Amino acid sequence: MTDTRARRAWDEFRDSRFLPATVLVLILSCAATQFVASYTYAAANDKPENIPIVVVGTLAPSAAAALEPELEGALGGSLQVQHVDDRSQAVEMINEQKVFAIIETRSGSTHLALDVSGASGQTVATLLEESMPPVLQKAGFTVTVTDIKPLQDGDPHGLTIFYMTLASVIVGFVGDVQLGVHARSLRPWERIGFTAAYSIFGGFGMAAVVDWLLGALDLPFVESWFILTLTLFTCGMVFTMFSSLFGRWVMIPTWLVMVLLGNPSSGGAVSWPLLPRLLATIGGWLPPGASVNAQHTAVYFPDHQYV
């Protein structure tokens, strides 16, 4: 009798309006938990694995013998040291975003110049500024630290590009959610057209607020607008694709790819050398990471853009 009542109660619940609402409660609870976990995981990696730097100049054999072991052991052995003879070549490597810092040496001198690049990644620049001078001083050198490629004054922590991208990603797929709820009678090509429309206007609005209204960044306006528009549109189309594949469960893969994996691995909040290996590997292949990289290069390295 008890089993029959329980079965009847389950059948009634399964066919009621409360089952999908209950499932959503569970999904949203898990999503909130995973959201916090993904960002905490990305920011909690205190052991970088690979920070490329370049050493310029020549040292006397005795000085080189004192410096090299300290560099090799610095930051847990994460520094990847390259050597060039010409400073202009080293600066070019900074501009091409191949290295994050320059150590300049001079034969017969115990003074070293440590040049970091805040624009290459503020979290990495801060780490090198704090950790490298003690290492170099231990080897018997005096050190001067200079940021040769600083962030713009309106964005001292280098997070504005990440916030722009985060807004583009979330509004991009939420916009398509709203089209599906409130304009479901649209034909496929019409839905694509309206996705493009809110992408264009949304991208313009974000760029205008950041540059013209708040003055946080001096943007290459048309290029930044295009990047934001493409990010919005791509995320909307990814949601549409997942909607066709997964139906009512579309938010699960969308949230996984765009938010749980895409945003923490983008390199916007934490530079890629400081990310866990998994996130650093996949970041550039997902829309948030591609958008952050494109926007960052357009703003700070406009003469060294590449596809």
Image (cartoon, helix red, strand yellow):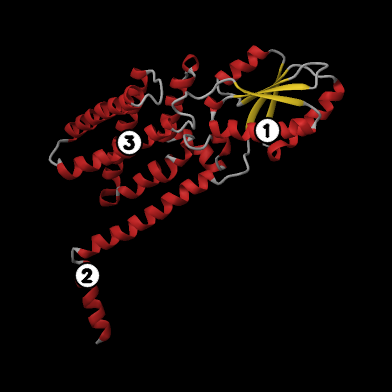
Between discs 2 and 3, the one toward the N terminus: 2
x and y percent of residue 158 in the render? 48, 30
Mark nearer the viewer, 1 or 3: 1
x and y percent of residue 290 in the render? 43, 30
For the N terminus, which image quadrant?
Answer: bottom left
Mark 1 crowdedness (10 Å alpha carbons): few <14, some 14-19, many ≥20: some
Amino acid type of the residue that numbered disc 1 sits on in the rendered structure: Leu
The image shows residue 256, relative to residue 236, as above or below, that is below
The image shows residue 253, relative to residue 305, as above or below, that is below
Mark 3 crowdedness (10 Å alpha carbons): few <14, some 14-19, many ≥20: many
x and y percent of residue 282 in the render? 49, 38
Between discs 1 and 2, the one toward the N terminus: 2
Q: Can you identify the residue that label 2 sits on?
A: 13
The front one of 176 and 118 is 118
Residue at the bottom extreme, as displayed: 1
Amino acid type of the residue that numbered disc 2 sits on in the rendered structure: Phe
Q: Calculate the distance from the C-alpha at mark 1 to the C-alpha at mark 3.
A: 35 Å
Between discs 1 and 3, the one toward the N terminus: 1
Q: Can you identify the residue that label 1 sits on?
A: 79
Q: Secondary structure at mark 1?
A: strand
Q: Can you identify the residue that label 3 sits on?
A: 235
